[in-house]
Each structure stands twice: as structure tokens, then as C-alpha cells.
Image: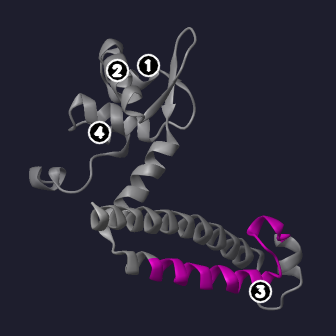
Amino acid sequence: MSESDATDGPPPFEDAFASDDVEQRIYGTILQTHKPTTASAIADSANCDPKTARKYLSWFDDLGIVTRHDGHPATYERNNAYFEWRRINQLAADHSVEDLQERVRELTTRITEYEEAYDAASPAAVDAVAAAEASDEQTIDDVYSDLGDWATAREERDRYERARQQRTDSEREQASG
């Protein structure tokens, strides 16, 4: 392999954040942290000093990016509500009210189709095994795929509706301000 081949493409998975600065490595580690984790463990993953990790984790806690759990030692985890809020703000900034409304309509249509196909109000109300056994056309994998898509469509519709409401409120404020 030539030297130029070695630098093309993504970094090796086991060292995915090696070229980032320490703040980015800690942030990248936080993105992958879904349970309370000590600053020392985060520092190990981010390849930095635990004191440096604590400094950035404190800052990320102030920003709402992580949640700090008191204890000995304190632990930190990704604040999913922050990332949800950020995603909704980005949708509202990137799309017009009309675009957001159209996406809500599309997702509502898809959700209604699943509700009718499975005669249920939500994916959780469907017995996947029974649905697959009752169908001549769908395997259990097909049913699980539908249920996953249905659940995703419901979550996405909620995000787009919240972004639409946010964008509508913002435009009303600008018009009256």
C-alpha cells in the first residue's frame, strides 16, 4: 500500500477520533456514551488526561450536552434531549413551514397505511409473530421491518411537527415584532 493510500478514507475504527483535537475526541466519545460513564473512562476512550476530560465534561454539562450524575466518582452520559432539541432546531432552520407541513402529511399517510394494514394504533400493539403467520406474503423479517419503519415514521413526524410549530411561532413573532 502506498503512503497516499494509507491517508485516503476514514481512519481505522479503533482510532476513529485520533486526528481530532481533544475537545472533539471527548465530544465524539460522548456521542457514543449511552450509560453513565466516569470521566476516567471517557478520558481513556478519548486518549487524553482525566483532568482535561473533566474540564470539557463540566463545560458540556453546562451546555446541556451531557448529564452529570453525582457520586464517587461522578459519571456522565449523553443528554438525548439536547440532541433531540438540536435536531428540531436544525429542521426548523433548514425548511420552510410549507416543506415541514408537507413532510408531516407524508409521514401521516405512511403511518395511517401501517395502522390499516396491521389493524393497530401503534407498532407496539402488533404481535409480529402472529402477523407473519397470518400472512402468505410477509415473513417475520418483513413484519419487523414494517414495525421499525412505522415507529421511525411516528418519531420523525413528531420531530417535523415540532419544527413546524417552532418555525410558525418564529415567523409570527417576526411579523408582529
Image quadrant where residue 23 sits: top left
2 shown above or below 148? above
Residue under pointer 3: 116
SS class, disc 3: helix
Percent of width and height locating residue 25: 30, 34
State which tag comes first along the sequence, 4 or 2: 4
Main SS class of the magenta portion in the image: helix
Residue under pointer 1: 39
Image quadrant where residue 131 sits: bottom right
Q: Amino acid at mark 1?
A: Ala
Residue lying farthest to the front in this orientation: 176
Badge 3: how crowded within 10 Å, few (<14), some, or many (20+)? few
Closer to the camera: disc 1 or disc 3? 3
Q: How far, Cα to Cα, is label 1 from label 3?
A: 49 Å
State which tag comes first along the sequence, 3 or 4: 4
In the drawing, does residue 84 fall left or right of residue 25?
A: right
Q: Residue at x 56, y 27 (%)?
A: 36
Q: Which residues are magenta?
A: 101-127
In this rendered view, identify the residue nearer to me: 107 or 13: 107
Residue under pointer 4: 17
Dot 3 and dot 4 residues touching (CB under 8 Å): no
Q: Residue at x 16, y 50 (%)?
A: 7
Q: Is 118 within the magenta? A: yes
Q: How far, Cα to Cα, is label 2 from label 1?
A: 6 Å
78 shown above or below 144? above
